[in-house]
Amino acid sequence: MSRLGNRADWADDEEFDDPSALPAQQVITNKDGTKTVISYRFNDDNKKVKVTRRIKSTVVREHVNPQVAERRSWVKFGLEKGHPPGPTFDTTSVGENIVFRPSINWKAQAKEAEKEGGEKGSMKDQLKDKKVKCRICSGEHFTARCPFKDTMAPVEEATGGAGAEADEDKAGGLGAGSSSYVPPHMRGKAGAAGGEKMGGRFEKDDLATLRVTNVSELAEEQELRDLFERFGRVTRVFLARDRETQRAKGFAFISYADRGDAASACDKLDGFGYRHLILRVEFAKRST
Amino acid sequence: MRPILLSGHERSLNQIRFNKDGDLLFSVSKDKNVCAWWTANGERLGTYAGHQGAIWTVDVSPNTVILATGSADNTVRLWNIKTGECVKTWEFPTAVKRVAFSPDGSQLLAVTEKRMGFLGAIAVLDIAYGDGEGNNLNVQADEPSLRITCTESKATVAGWSFLGRFIIAGHEDGSVSQYDPKSGEQLETAQVHEFDHQINDIQFSPDRTHFITASKDKSAKLLSARNLAILKTYIADTPLNSASITSKKDYVILGGGQAAMDVTTTSARQGKFEARFYHKVFEDEVGRVRGHFGPLNTIDVHPNGTAYASGGEDGYVRIHHFDKGYFDFMYEVEREQLRK
């Protein structure tokens, strides 16, 4: 009899009790003032999922003029009558970011920018009064056709006009002083002797570049851009990918237009959970 | 900074105004609606409907209870800001080009157009605020308490000086004059801009001791309200429609652009549709903000100096909240001053 009763009992066993029931939500208050909320839900495949959220609440106190505070409770009227609170998309939108930095010699800078823009506009104009110039003797012929080709090394353009003797000196110096090879397109530039790095173009905004590691394999550049653009204007997103599989290698570089934005992004996104991994964000070190 | 674009109007903007606390922005355009916007997020609070023609001008009372508008339908209307109702309508013989509340809000001036045999005039209306809780706002005087007629050249814009001591008007011929708001008598007049170049805007500094004029002669001038002396001159390369003085930082913002009728013959780049920032004291141009597709018709600065808004011929209002770089910028002398 008791055995039978036991058998009847097993149907009531918890495991079989109610497969759709979910454990109640748990809220734990941690020592550091944060709260951990553990809740359960079913996902799309009807599997039970445990969701653990850690919530840090900060109280932001703002002092507002009481009249202003009273106005905030006003209800909408006219064409907006009955609309829910919050801006509507047909009347309000956010424009693209404008970089506005006042500067003392604004006029001169604007002129320069305009000039640059104009030059880019037509290559023909730019090259109109350019003549063929030999890199060896500055004569009006191609370098390959120069009569001194075999006897002299190419000179730096900066000293080109200084006179033949000076040129020879410099040329000799270049050959003897720095043993490393300088590719032709790097010659004549200020930093040529020091050996300019590839991608020197980016050097100046290195200060505002973040290195992001522990990025998910499935990450997309656009996603990263969206994530990081919240903090300011992003000028470059580089996500390293495997050449064959096209999957992300796990690190990325994000360049900002402004260092302050980069700092706040670094502060906020270090330790941020992205996909299934926790991002590590730090300022990129200069590659030397 | 990311500007907030407000596209509540179907035609070109004529004037925009912040209220005294800077939480609301009012805009009027050639379509017949007045819009009220929250400055912080660009949400539209509502619209005020009732005018039958293009609305030229708007002003908000210092306590943000009453809104005044002047329109091409020859009326000045008062609105209950909170509810959107029209509480009073005054009829004038011609269109109303500018309205402005006195600093204490007890009076309103209205500049009327010269047309159909009527001379341009400035009417002063007394404003009552009912019981102080937004009731009985419709109890207003029916007749203007004062009427100043401009016999020489019509007034295009006008405003109140410090403590409402003077009414200052800008004229079509480029002159500025000062009137006594009690007697209506002209106290002083000065030809500050080139002759026959209309003054398009007058805006006062926060304490109303000086004001800036924007003129068609491609310059803006800072004038003393007391004796109309020219304090500063800001030269631009385009006709100016609006000028404003910023608080907190010492700048002036000028807006203008090719006249609307010439716009189609030039590219957007040449149109110079940019807000220009000049240093108020040194008269140097320090930067520009672009964004509009047409000339800027009106500019207003947040009373705290943290934002500015511009309305253009393109029908958009753009609210710009300044970011850190704007506040950090200082001339070397200013920085030294700060160190002392």
Image (tube, rainbow, N blue to C red):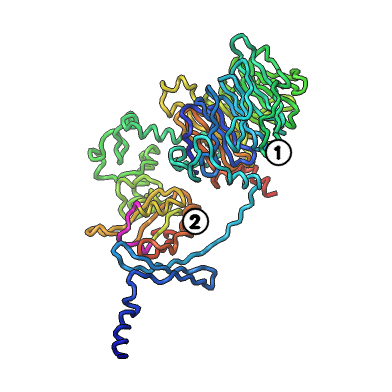
Image position, residue B242 (x, y; %): 57, 28
Q: Chain of mark 2?
A: A
* Residue B241 seen by the camera: yes
Looking at this view, name the residue that lies furthest to the right.
B183
Left or right: where B326 falls relative to A169: right
Image position, residue B89 (x, y; %): 62, 24
Count the marks. Answer: 2
* Residue B297 seen by the camera: no
Mark 1 is on which residue type?
Answer: Gly
The answer to whether dots 2 and 1 both sit on one chain is: no
Q: Residues within 10 Å of mark 1 (few under 14, many from 20)?
A: few
Q: Residues within 10 Å of mark 2 (few under 14, many from 20)?
A: few
Task: Identify the residue at image location x=46%, y=49%.
Answer: A232
Q: Secondary structure at mark 2?
A: helix
User: Which numbered dot is residue A264?
Assistant: 2
User: Which numbered dot is residue A242?
Assistant: none
* Residue closest to the eye, B176 or A94: A94
Magenta segment's dominant SS is: loop
Stretch of the chain drawn in magenta: A213-222
Mark 2–mark 1 distance (CA, rounded to whole Å): 46 Å
A60 relative to B111, above or below: below
Task: Identify the residue at image location x=47%, y=59%.
Answer: A268
Image position, residue B73 (x, y; %): 56, 20
Image position, residue A64 (x, y; %): 63, 49
The residue under label 1 is B132
* Residue closest to the eye, B181 or B202: B181
Confirm whether the magenta stretch covers residue A218.
yes
